[in-house]
Image (cartoon, grey):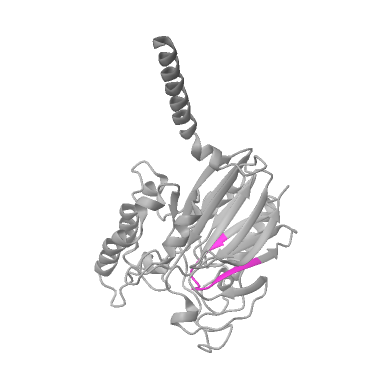
Amino acid sequence: MYKKKLKKINRRIFLFGSGIFLLSFFPFFKSLNANNRTQFKITCGSCISQDRKQPIWKSILKERSNAFIFMGDNVYGDDKKNGELEILKKAYEKQKEKIPFKKLEETNEIFSVWDDHDYGKNDGGSEFPYKKQSKELFLKFWRIPLNDSRRGREGIYFKRKRKIGNNIIQFIFLDTRYFRSPLKPTDEKWTPTKERYIPDDDPSKTYLGERQWKWLNNSMKEEADIRILVSSIQVIADGHGYEKWGNLPMEKLRLFNLIDKNNINNLIILSGDRHRGGIYKEKTNGGNQLFELTSSSLNLPAGKLFKSKEELGPNRIGSTFLEENYGVVEINDDKKITLSIRGLDQKTHNKININLS
């Protein structure tokens, strides 16, 4: 009788221990879909004010994504009086308490780039006198390690690689502020397609600066199955006169030529800035296909706050979404990718499927 009881207890201990062992692998099993294809999910967004409520996180946290990318305007701290970043410092302090970093980090690796409002100057570029101090605040807030490449050079551009199933995903994060030349002001302010800026064909003007261009060229030569390029401002999108790569056409052409030179097809671009969400598609002169997902804003939507309307949409797929939104990139092991724009209720408002196989 005693032996039977002991055997029963040992069996329960074994089953309990096995359960704990299997639970330790739960995140791995969770990443497999019904067909045993590893899936990697990226969520992203931009333009989030520390002075407003942030209900969007409820939906984002439900996604249980593997990575979240902050694509710029992660605080609003620009000082119109050109002060010494006191407003930016206070903005970071307040935002630290607003974004649910602890819950976000339960499943997500966090990446970030800046745009003008966390750079410190509205529509600012290389002329901003406090850009070095602004960079230090950025590095501190995002807890960038001391041995990170961003601490040893100008600007905040960087890259990462992750192996997901059988695929190598390369993330390239650009700095479109630190080195950017002045833009050409419009000659017809607020006229559709010419609202603030007009194209400038001056070949001496730059978005990235020569050192970052060289780095980007070398980065694109690296082995990767899927490439994701993060630019705080829109690359493909056109049809408006706000900030975009099209304001410096020679720089946009240089980027497209670099893509052709390295024969990169189906490049995925993630961007923010616009306070509206959208999905875009274009081909380079060499026939390489590009896709862009613009996600903006997390809590400053153009429709509600600025009463904005639809704009012209060359290269756009569907309409723009003018309410609070975030972007989702889902990658399966068979190289099938879905780009989505989702809103406060996790509802999908625009979507495109891409097959890289």
Give the quarter of the figure containing the N terminus. top left
In the rendered image of this protein, does residue 28 appear above or below residue 118? above
Q: Is residue 274 magenta?
A: yes
Q: Is residue 161 magenta?
A: no
User: Closer to the camera, 265 or 318?
Assistant: 318
* Image quadrant where residue 149 sits: top left
Identify the residue shown where x is 54% and y is 62%: 327
Name the spot of residue 245 as percent of width and height, x first. Answer: 56, 68
Instruction: State whether residue 317 appears in this view.
Output: yes
User: Closer to the camera, 11 or 163?
Assistant: 11
Name the spot of residue 292 as percent of width and height, x first. Answer: 61, 63
Identify the residue shown where x is 50% and y is 82%: 196
User: Closer to the camera, 127 or 28?
Assistant: 28
Instruction: State whether residue 71 appears in this view.
Output: no
Residue closest to the far front? 1
Residue closest to the far right? 287
Q: Is residue 314 left or right of residue 134?
A: right
Name the spot of residue 135 as percent of width and height, x first. Answer: 34, 57
Name the spot of residue 50 as percent of width and height, x first. Answer: 33, 68
Q: How many marks?
A: 0
Residue span colored magenta? 270-280
Identify the residue shown where x is 43% and y is 68%: 47
* Image quadrant where residue 309 sits: bottom right
User: Closer to the camera, 34 or 68?
Assistant: 34
* Image quadrant where residue 254 sits: bottom right
In the rendered image of this protein, does residue 320 appear above or below residue 331? below
Identify the residue shown where x is 45% and y is 47%: 107
In the rendered image of this protein, does residue 277 appear above or below residue 21? below
